[in-house]
Amino acid sequence: MPGRAAAERIRKAIAVVNEVADGAGDEEITPTEIAEAIRDCLELKEIEQGSNARKYLGEALDAVSDGMPADFVAMTLYAALGALGESRPEL
Amino acid sequence: MSSAEGRGRTLDEAVDAALIELGESRRNVDVRVISEGPEETVVEVSVIDHTAAPAVAAGAPGNGKADVARSLVEGLLKLMGVRAQVTVRTGTDPITLDISGRDLGALIGWRGETLRALQSVTNVMVGKHLDEGERVIVDVERYRQRREHTVREIALRAARQVKMTGDAITLDAMQAFERRAIHLALQDDPDVGSSSIGEEPDRRVVVGPRKPANG
């Protein structure tokens, strides 16, 4: 299914951010790693130019560089995941 | 809150013994491991007091931040068209909000994904009322609490096996809060320790023999 890879990659980015928010206490995650995970999502062709998913991913990346709390970044990534679902009703 | 002590050869047997005495199901209880040995496990099983929480929901004085969080989540659920009751779980740190009602499966989502998203949104909304590093935990129908109990039981079972065989065990991939519950469950065990391997979202806990201190 074409959109699955994009959803999985966004979920991976969310998991990284949630690790910071939930503090599993078993790994130190840096903002650079979170930004990398989001950039990995933006590299996918499935996330089309001008789509809401891409817009939210861009906002999440900005939020990381602005030092916003992990929950804010996570919320924006969930919005990207939701936007991906909206554009693909078959999922 | 009524409680009972249960004893058994395994953790499951001990919990079952206490549940029979209380006449309750696992869903409605909290489990605390009192002692655990190769021959016998002893647990204290307490029935969750469902009447205490509504007292807070009705506006009992107490934690102002928790009340703010509760009312914000209530408003959010209303806008989502979800009919549910939000209560503040008593005696917990961090602040924990329990959402209960009928047919709330959609609010939990696949592997708790929607619930986790709801918690993120809640913390963003409540953030300005909280101190630095303070967070609000959101639970729906005690899903999160039950998951924590389940992974804790898995951890203790794995620890028993590690003690018997001396071999490390790699558990299934888990979310951060589940891995945290495992690390906490095993942190005081002198013989068995836990660590995590792999990358999100496939990060797994390894339960293995504790390495002897150097020297």
Image (cartoon, coloured by chain):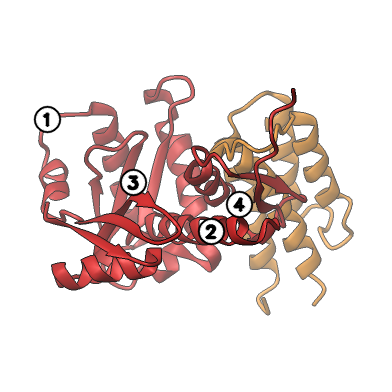
Chain colours: A orange, B red
Give me the chain letter of mark 1.
B
**Are discs 4 and 2 both within one chain?**
no
- Tag in front: 4 or 2: 2
Q: What residue type is labelled 1?
A: Pro
Tell me which residue sits at (42%, 54%) in the image.
Answer: B37
Comes first in the chain, label 3 or label 2 = 3
- Which chain's residue wears label 2? B
Judging from the image, mark 3 belongs to the subunit labelled B
Three-letter code for the amino acid on which mark 3 is drawn = Val
- Residue B75 appears left or right of B58: right
> Is disc 1 surrounded by few (<14), some (14 to 19) or many (20+) residues within 10 Å?
few
Judged from the image, the secondary structure of the residue bearing numbered disc 1 is loop
Chain letter of mark 4 equals A
Secondary structure at numbered mark 4: helix
Q: Nearer the viewer, residue B141 or A56?
A: B141
Q: What residue type is labelled 4?
A: Tyr
For the point 47% across and 20% down, the residue is B132
Res. B73 mark: 3
Judge depth for marks 3 and 2 and give the one in front: 2
Q: State the image coordinates of residue B187 (x, y, percent, origin top left).
A: 52, 38
Distance from the alpha carbon under mark 3 to that under mark 1: 19 Å
Q: Quadrant of residue B101?
A: bottom left
- Label 2 SS: helix
What residue sits right under mark 2 in the picture? Answer: B160
**Residue pointed to by mark 4:** A78
As measured in the structure, the alpha-carbon distance from the residue carrying label 2 to the one carrying label 1 is: 45 Å
